[in-house]
Image: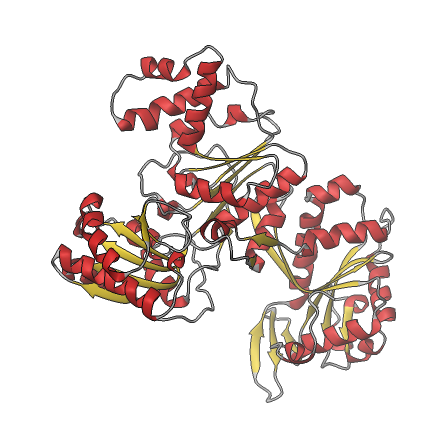
Amino acid sequence: MIPLLEGARLQDLQSRAEARFYEVCRDQLPADVLVIYSAAWLYRDNRGRINEGEADFTLVSPTLGVLVVEVKGGGVTFDPRTGLWHSVDRNGRANSIKDPFEQAQDERHSLRYQIEGHANWRQFSGRDFPLGHAVVFPDINDAAPLIGPNRQREFIGVNSDLADMVRWVSSVMRFWQRPNDTPLGGAGARVIEDILCTDIDVQAVLRAAIDHAEVQRIRLTANQAKVLRTIGGRRRAVVSGGAGTGKTLLAVEKAKQLAADRRDVLLLCYNRPLADSLAAGLRNTPRIAVHSYHQFCDRRAARCTDAGRDVLQEAKEAYPGESDKDHFDTQLPFALALSAEVLDEKFDAVVIDEAQDFSDEYWFGIEPLLRDQAAGHLYVFIDENQTIYSRSGNIPIEDEPYLLTFNCRNTAPIHEAGYRFYKGEAVDSPEIAGLDVTWASSDQDEAQADAVSRRIRQWVTVEGLNAHDVAVLVAKQPKAHCYELLEPRLRATGVRWVIEQHGVAGAVLVDTFSRFKGLEAHAIVLWLGDEVVDDEAWETVYVGATRAKSLLALVGSHRALRAVRDFVNA
């Protein structure tokens, strides 16, 4: 049984009908029949559209095949004149419901797409197998009134059928048996179990880089696990989600899966501190190279120079310019593209996090890094709301993105504040209660620096937070002036602190919000400048606020914080 529900967990199911069906399956079906409760999946149909499927119960038998079961409690009514179905509760109240037989039929079709389209199934055999659907009404005694043209008695279950589940399941599957179907066998049943139920645990490499003494496991949400299973069979995919939805965790896990399959993997991101954190967490994982984009460009250009060709000089001659923008946005990307003509170093897969910060020029040199550009793997993880560098380019993948829709990082109050500045597919708030966001406003920079240092002292000295779990993120110009104001004040607190030095145990980190993008900390002080409001740079608030897991304090002028609060409370 997946999941294993006992005692209070089983009693907590909202549907008593589903709980009863779970119990009879558990108690009566043989051990080789896998029963999956509330299985969910993503699939691409024969028109190429991405759809979502979910079944109340999925039964997988080595001898009988796969059965999708929809369970409906209480009584039901059907009006053939209108085609409307209603459930009837114990008090006689009628509630409109979807046609349960159409639901079960749709679930059967979507499950076939999911299984037969998955690489694991194709590698196994791709044989036809028995797949059916049924609808069970545990509270109804007579099936006769339910029978119709698309509602055969053979796949209707009622109260009396639950007394002998082995007989009923066998009867249903005989109805759905096709001449060319073959039994799954034990191996086929295990493949389907892996497709639908593989448990996914991801090592929290970001936290490991900040505090090596802390070991934590993060279990992906059902939505994240579903996306990772689905893209497992595809060579190219885009995964999109808001802050805290687990994009970086999924990117790391995907890279590890590819490496475990003996593929050479390049994991790229835009931010150097994020790249350093990921590299630290993956340092013992062979076959994965982790770099920031420009770090990798520099590395490749240097190797080309060692090989006798100065590709960076060629790039400067092709695209003249002396500014940092010329160097980072044009010359280094072109040098990366030229490096493919010189170096033998290639990769079987490229995984890119923070892809929203990659311009068209950046992408120009990515695909030539693949050993096989036609069959190589390319996975892209993106949050278009975090495009703080205004350079988002056209991703070389045409398929629709897979969406992550659950915030698993922030507490609910932090989510509600940060996601006011988010535009895109809805992201569900986490079910993590937390303390309210705090606000400290003053129109003097010195007083704002005082507010930052007081908050740090309160968290670390009074409330006992570990210093390395706290970060001050500056979103105010010029940053050097802010650092200068903070230095004597933080020193006076007696708390150890560092500026732009990541991974220092026992020290509060002070950095800019942009350099901290992609990272997280338990407690964040976000110091906002008036320019955020003047420029309506709301993505700054979104990125900065959502770095905080548990505690968030905002500091700024009265005008800046009033504008942000008005936005949050709107």
Q: Position of residue 386 (x, y in %)?
A: 36, 46
Whole-percent x, y for residue 432 in the image: 45, 69
At which x and y percent is residue 430?
46, 65
Q: Position of residue 417 (x, y in %)?
A: 33, 62
List the single residue furthest toward the top: 308
Question: In the figure, 340 relative to 378: above or below?
Answer: above
Of residue 487 and residue 267, the one placed in the foreground of this image is 487
Q: How is the image coloured?
A: secondary structure
Q: The C terminus lies in which quarter of the figure?
A: bottom left
x 86%, y 67%: residue: 30
Residue 210 appears left or right of 543: right
Which residue does the image show at 78% across and 71% down from the upper left? 25
Q: Nearer the viewer, residue 169 or 379?
A: 379
Residue 385 in sight in this render: yes
Which residue occupies the foreground of this view, 417 or 150?
A: 417
Which residue sits at x=45%, y=29%? Answer: 296
The image shows residue 218, relative to residue 280, as above or below, that is: below
Query: 416 above or below 213?
Result: below
Screen quadrant of the N terminus: bottom right
In the picture shown, does residue 413 fall above or below 24?
Answer: above
Nearest to the observer: residue 372 or residue 254:
254
